[in-house]
Amino acid sequence: MSETPGYTAGQQGFDGAPSDQPPPGYGPPQQQPGYGPYGYPYPAPYPLAMPPQPRSGMALTGMILGIVGLCTSILYVGGVIGIVGLVFSIIGIRTVNRTGQAGKGMAITGLITSIIAIIVNAIEIAVVIWVVHTFSTCTQYDPNVKPTQYQQCVRSGILGN
């Protein structure tokens, strides 16, 4: 039997206590707050959060179409996409109000971006029609034969002079 140097079985501590007890000044193991003693189960976990409400597909579609319509309004397609996005957004708002689904903010975003896309596209079309009309009324003056009269006609049509 091998013995640890400096230790003999049955040796007493400083105060005369048998050596199988912890030295004086040390108490039983301390427990960490929130945990039970050894062998006991862990405390109950926190309750799970409620799952999020389902979003309205119409609201999401209206928002996506409104943003795409706004981005493509310079290409003359945005007005049509904006109109479709406007319809989807209105249906999405009604669905959210009726069923209580999430997505009202998305539907409002789709509504606003769709309206802006339609307005931008309408202004763009009006400007193009006005410019084409101005240039078409000045075609009576040949720019190759009488360039000053043609330029004066275009300036007066565009600038209003």
Image: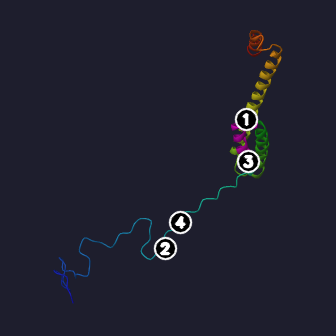
Q: Position of residue 106 (x, y in %)?
A: 69, 45
The residue pinned by badge 4 equals 45
Q: Where is mark 2, residue-wise?
A: 41
For the residues labelled 3 and 2, say whether their Cβ atoms are less than 8 Å apart. Answer: no
Of marks 3 and 4, which one's residue comes earlier in the chain? Answer: 4
Q: CA distance from mark 3 to mark 2?
A: 49 Å
Residue farthest left in this picture: 6
Structural crowding at the residue carrying mark 3, measured as other residues with C-alpha within 10 Å and reported as few (<14), some (14–19) or many (≥20): many
| Magenta segment includes 95 | no
Viewer-proximal residue, 24 or 159? 159
Q: Residues within 10 Å of mark 1 (few under 14, many from 20)?
A: few
Quarter of the picture containing the N terminus is bottom left
Image position, residue 57 (x, y; %): 74, 51
Q: Secondary structure at mark 2?
A: loop
Q: Amino acid at mark 1?
A: Leu
Write down the residue under mark 3: 61
* Nearest-to-viewer mark from 4 and 1: 1
Q: Amino acid at mark 2?
A: Pro
Question: Disc 1 to disc 2, how far (Cα)?
Answer: 66 Å
Tell me the distance, in whole angstroms, between the alpha carbons under discs 1 and 3.
Answer: 21 Å
Q: Please tell me the numbered disc located at residue 75.
A: 1
Residue 123 is left or right of residue 41, and the answer is right
Tell me if label 3 and label 4 are in contact, CB under 8 Å: no
Image-quadrant location for residue 110:
top right
Name the front one of labels 3 and 2.
3
Say which mark, if any, is on residue 44. none
